Amino acid sequence: PRDARALLRHERALLAAESEAYIAPLDSEGPELRETDARGKLVLDPCLGRWELCKAKSSLCVMLLAGVLVTFFVTYLGHRYLGAYVAAGAIPLAEGSLVVGVALPAVLAAFLCALEHSEWLFLRRVSPQAQLRYTPAVHKLAARFRRGRR
């Protein structure tokens, strides 16, 4: 652990020295990822093994694939549900609006929240000292929910 921390401190110092010329323009753009250089390279955890990195990458890929599959499944269900109305020649406004205006956007928003959380988990596993430039929506909602219950 001591050698790993010393190696991490040394990498941070090297990156800071290398990217000092690029930091000034980025400061005016707002908060940025900590522990990154100006080109967005993360300082990986030196104790991270190859399997842990593969596991983190695969969990992010599985989340992407699951989101796409769920989106296709909900679209298919909406198409089947409205298909009977299309065959009859008229789609009721309320039901069509519900499927197109509520169900599909809700599924896509849930997928976006899950993807943000997966990205946060990936970054925490791969580079624990780094932070995202934004707070995932799931984390904001959970904080509001906890404040509301008190």
Image: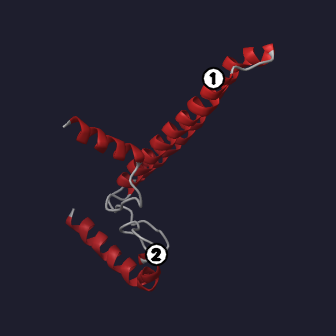
Extreme residue in the bottom direction:
21
In terms of image quadrants, where is residue 74?
A: top right
Q: Quadrant of the C terminus?
A: top left
- Identify the mark nearer the N-term, 2 or 1: 2
Question: From the viewer's perspective, is residue 25 above or below residue 58?
Answer: below
Q: How is the image coloured?
A: secondary structure
Can you identify the residue that label 2 sits on?
38
Left or right relative to 121: residue 148? left
Tag on residue 111? none
Residue named by callout 1: 94
Q: Would you identify the image quadrant in which residue 77 lies?
A: top right
Q: Position of residue 11 (x, y in %)?
A: 35, 74
Give the residue at x 60% y 26%: 98
The residue at the point 57 percent across, 36 percent down is 105
Residues at marks 2 and 1 touching, judged by CB atoms closer than 8 Å: no
> Residue at the spot x=80%, y=15% of the render?
87
Residue 9's x, y, as percent? Answer: 28, 73
Tell me the crowding category of disc 1: few under 14, some 14 to 19, or many 20 or more residues within 10 angstroms, Cα based. few
* Image height of 124 relative to 76, above or below: below
Name the one closer to the observer, 52 or 61.
61
Does dot 1 land on a helix, a strand or a loop? helix
In this rendering, does residue 86 appear at all?
A: yes
Direction from residue 28 to residue 141 in the image, left or right: left
Residue 52 in sight in this render: no
Amino acid tagged 2 = Ala
Q: Secondary structure at mark 2?
A: loop
- Amino acid, disc 1: Ala
Q: Position of residue 114 (x, y in %)?
A: 46, 41
- Left or right: residue 84 versus residue 6 is right
Quadrant where the N terminus sits is bottom left
